[in-house]
Image (cartoon, grey):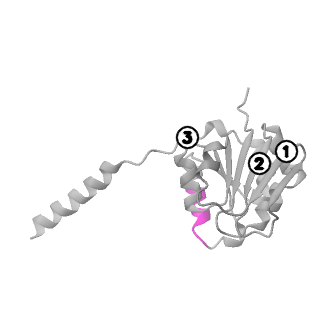
Amino acid sequence: MPEEYKKVFVTVGTTRFDLLCDTIMTSPVLKALKKIGCKEITLQIGNSAFEVGEYEKEGVKVNAYRFKDSIQENIKGASLVISHAGAGSCLETLEANKPLLVVVNEDLMDNHQLELAEQLQVDGHLYYCTCDTLENTLEEVDFSLLAPFPKPDATLFVKYLDDIFRVKQHVE
């Protein structure tokens, strides 16, 4: 039996991503989320025009808020995270070892976010889509196939510094 994703956390970070907020609340997307076990969505809406509050639609409870000092608690409490493609949100989720679906904001296609999402998907750490393909992606991907994000290795930084100072000493 596939894993159920009862609690879904959706974040747009500090930006305005009205399309993602609105898309999450459409019947087809809510039905796709329900199919994978979703019963509850926490929706961090940032500066989006979406209204803060508690909703229920298609049998899914939704709690929308703008900002908190930290979203770490929301990430840890979620069984699935759906996020904008901001590096901070992606890395925080991956470091918490949570399945991640990144929704790329196509209005920002000239920035680094698409490249980051593409590379992390190629590396097997997340899936990404657009608002247009969100429903289909939720129905087709298997989050259990995602590879855990590697833990940071502080020894690499120390080795890097050692190498730099070793080279500098040989030059002098």
Q: Is residue 113 left or right of residue 8?
A: left
Residue that mark 3 sits on: 147
How far apart are the two marked residues, 3 and 2, measured between alpha carbons? 24 Å
- What label sits on residue 158 in the rendered view? none
Who's the residue at 69% across and 38% down the image? 142
Q: Nearer the viewer, residue 104 or 122?
A: 104
**Membership of 135 in magenta stretch:** no
Residue 172 lies in quadrant: bottom left
**Amino acid marked by disc 1:** Val
* Disc 1 target residue: 60
Q: Which secondary structure, mark 2? A: strand
Q: Where is residue 171 in the image (x, y as percent from the top left)?
A: 12, 69
Residue at (71, 72) in percent of width and height? 107
What is the magenta range?
111-119
Q: Mark 2 points at which residue?
A: 41
Question: What residue type is disc 2 on?
Answer: Ile
Asked whether, in this view, residue 52 is left or right of residue 71, the answer is: right
Q: Which percent across, then down, holds residue 157?
A: 31, 55
Under mark 3, the amino acid is Ala
Viewer-closest of 136 and 98: 98
